[in-house]
Amino acid sequence: MKTKSSNANLYLYTFLSLLMGLVSLVDPASLGQRAMDHQKERAEQAVKAWGL
């Protein structure tokens, strides 16, 4: 069974628009800040554990 190209394009563009919608919800700045906070916290824990 072969899909019509118009239906295939519709599915493709629908999928891509949903994907772009999800990507737009992600805030890279807050993710970067959260990663830096976790890295700082791990560094502080390592310093305490090693007694430096």
Image (cartoon, rainbow, N blue to C red):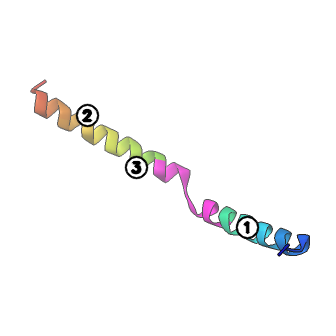
Q: Please, is residue 3 above or below residue 35 in the view?
A: below
Alpha-carbon neighbours of circle 3 within 10 Å: few (<14), some, or many (≥20)?
few
Which residues lie in the magenta part?
21-31
Q: Is residue 50 left or right of residue 11?
A: left
Does the magenta-highlighted stretch encompass residue 17? no
Please give the residue where the numbered disc 1 appears in the rendered image: 17
Residue at the (77%, 72%) spot, across then down: 11
Please give the residue where the numbered disc 3 appears in the rendered image: 34
Q: Amino acid at mark 2?
A: Ala
Residue 47 percent across, percent down from the top left = 17, 30
> In the rendering, which numbered label is found on residue 43?
2
> In the rendering, which numbered label is found on residue 47?
none
Instruction: Decide whether the magenta segment is chiefly helix, strand or loop.
Output: helix
Residue 31 percent across, percent down from the top left = 47, 51
Residue at the (78%, 66%) spot, across then down: 12
Q: Amino acid at mark 1?
A: Ser
